[in-house]
Amino acid sequence: MAGLRDFYGFLAAAQLGKAGQIQHQPLQLDNVILNKARQLPMVQRAKEFYLLNRLVEARRQLTHTVEDKQLLAAAARIASNWGWHNQAIIALAKARMYDDVSIRYPLAHKEAMIKYSRQMNVPTTWLFAIARQESIFSTDIRSDAGALGLMQLLPSTAKSLARKLKAKKPSSYQLIQPDTNIKFGTAYLKRLLNSFNGNLVLAVASYNAGPTKVRRWVPKHAIPEDVWVELIPYRETARYVKSVLTNQFIYNRQLGQTDGVFERMPNQSIGKAKGVIQKHIVSPSQTL
């Protein structure tokens, strides 16, 4: 299990004192298949629509029409080269090819991610991790609840953050612009971090389920973080937290960084005291 590229693989490796393995294997595609994919009418049409920012039509042309696995993989490489990361990830998943980490976990909008993470003192890798989980880096996505863009922000949330940022309240159109979306998404994560005493696991859970629910889930007595994640009562939120933590680990490796989240989880606990979320460091012998 310690060699798996997932939440439990990274957690198991950390507890065994081993380095988690992201198992990156670049796509092996020859020029023949790449040229064949480039010449496909639907790929050519997708490119034209993409360049015109007509993303709905572009999506219909690419992954909705290409079926052959090798051509899908080639289309993923081509879309990645265009900077169309959302469709590159989807194409590889449709082809059931999961090991090219550089395509599946792209450093999309890297300049803005670094810029706002530094401004607001939020780890850059967490921004990448949340954006990948929320939208798979789709800039124009809108959820059924009305959340918008890369980091899936509600307009009402962005408006409430505008005063703190000393910025104008963004319109819905502005919120689907990557720079604005990342700016307000980072500010929201920072707000959640502050409300949970800097605990990233609780902040990430709150990004999905809302801080009110997460406060109710924090136990009276301290328990290790990895145990708390398993006890999250909403399956969607539990899966979300595990996925974001997995994404974040991979992005740390992509950027040559480490923050030791999986190493800390069994030894860092969360609990409630006088209605305030607190972090407690416990020794390994005290963990469950």
Image (cartoon, grey):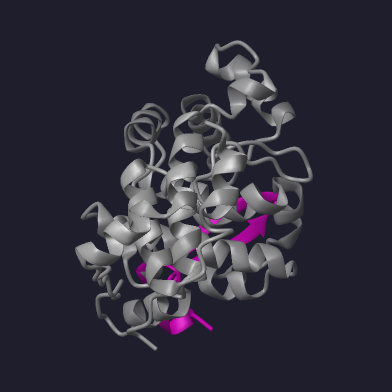
Residue 33 shown left or right of residue 185 in the figure = left
Which image quadrant is residue 55 in? top right
Q: Is residue 9 visible?
A: yes
Q: Is residue 278 on the magenta stretch?
A: yes
- Residue 182 within the magenta-colored segment of the rendering: no
What residue is rendered at 54% in x and 55% in y? Answer: 133
Foreground: 270 or 262? Answer: 262
**Figure check: 219 above or below 18:** above
Q: Quadrant of residue 147?
A: top right
Part of the protein shown in magenta: 263-288
Residue sitting nearer the eye, 41 or 229 = 41
Side (left or right) of 67 relative to 119: right
Q: Quadrant of the C terminus?
A: bottom right
User: In this rendering, does residue 97 appear at all?
Assistant: no
**Relative horizontal placement of residue 195, taking residue 178 as reference (left or right):** right
Front-lying residue, 50 or 162: 50
Q: Position of residue 250 (x, y in %)?
A: 35, 62
Horizontal and vertical percent for residue 85?
A: 42, 48
Q: Is residue 57 above or below residue 277?
A: above
Q: Residue at the spot x=33%, y=60% of the render?
A: 36
Look at the image and tell me in which quarter the N terminus lies: bottom left
Q: Is residue 141 above or below residue 269?
A: above
Where residue 173 appears, as percent x and y from the top left, is 64, 22
Q: Which quadrant would residue 249 be assigned to in this image?
A: bottom left
Which residue sits at x=38%, y=30%?
Answer: 112
Who's the residue at 21% across and 62% down the image? 31
Image coords of residue 80 (percent x, y):
35, 50
